[in-house]
Image (tube, grey):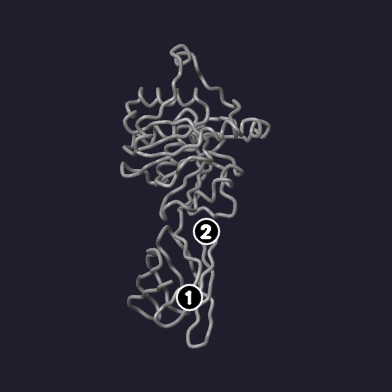
Amino acid sequence: MDSSSRFTDRRSVDARAARAARWMLALGVTLLSSACAQVPPAAEETYKPTPGQVGKDVVWVPSPPAVVERMLDIAKVTRDDFVMDLGSGDGRNIIAAGRRGARAVGVEFNPDLVGLSNRNAARQGVADRASFVQGDMFAADISQASVLALFLLTDNLRRLTPKFIDMKPGSRIVVNYFGIDGWQPDYEEEMKSDCEPWCVIKLYIVPARVAGKWRLAEGELELEQRFQVLFGTYTANGKKADITNARMEGDRIRFGIGGVQYTGRVQGSRMEGERSGGATGAWTAQR
């Protein structure tokens, strides 16, 4: 599947579960260069996917090219990125990322689509950067990706959310139309032209995990976290106050205590940054 629209085919999921397990995917450097579907020459010449065709977990519908390009714009894809698409269809997301110089890999269960995608990449001169492997998107290793470019149903995205949260803070997940349950997009845009009918692009930036207790020089900060949104309290000299304006963007954190604004970066069990407003200067916090 591509950054294409997909509709869950629930009747096929149970019947093909055993087959899906055999395609457990471990992506690594060697796999990126060697994995390729073997398709008979005759099939190579004649295979053409049909929008709406049934897949393992979804039905394939392609995204308009303008949407694909805008998704990569919003995710700010550069040659320094490693882009992945889960359910990559005819490969248009990955090939577009390859044209921007990024290293890119698509994971697709349908071997005919994998073969087609690799041929498309070769025709467009990006086969050295854009490749496709046959596998189950729910088993794929996405830990090294800096960008995911996806067009999946909300139910598919919900199943993948635990893996999303385990990605490196600052990784970008850009999706077409369907969003991630409970996770407010960091950015959302509806295209008004060159797009029909799937035209809403949403960007999610994977946040560092900061929930828990942190010790500052003057007191204790206790944080709760719902994706990039933070809640919590600050206790000093026996007095407790709610924090305000608290949010993550990747490994960047901001929050307010009284009239003081704190901004900084999270590095594992340590945070540090600068204060502004009612007080100024550097601050640090330790778990």
Nearer the observer, 281 or 66: 281
Q: Can you give x and y, in whole percent of width and height, for residue 150 in the image?
A: 49, 40
Q: Can you give x and y, in whole percent of width and height, for residue 31 in the image?
A: 38, 34
Left or right? Give the position of 81 relative to 203. left
Q: CA distance from mark 1 to mark 2?
A: 18 Å
Q: Residue at x 41, y 36 (%)?
A: 105
Residue under label 1, please give it. 221
Q: Can you give x and y, in whole percent of width and height, for residue 264 in the image?
A: 37, 67
- In the image, residue 130 above or below residue 144: above
Nearer the observer, 111 or 172: 111
Name the quadrant of the C terminus: bottom left
SS at circle 2? loop
Q: Residue furthest top?
A: 42
Q: Can you give x and y, in whole percent of width and height, for residue 284 in the image?
A: 37, 74
Q: Earlier in the sequence, mark 1 or mark 2?
A: 1
- In the image, residue 24 above or below residue 207: above
Rendering quarter of residue 138: top right
- In the image, residue 222 above or below residue 157: below
Q: Residue at x 59, y 40 (%)?
A: 153
Left or right? Give the position of 221 relative to 264. right
Residue under label 2, please give it. 227
Q: Residue at x 54, y 49 (%)?
A: 161
Q: Residue at x 48, y 49 (%)?
A: 203
Q: Amino acid at mark 2?
A: Phe
Q: Confirm or deny contact between disc 1 and disc 2 (CB under 8 A).
A: no
Q: Amino acid at mark 1?
A: Leu
The mark tally for this picture is: 2
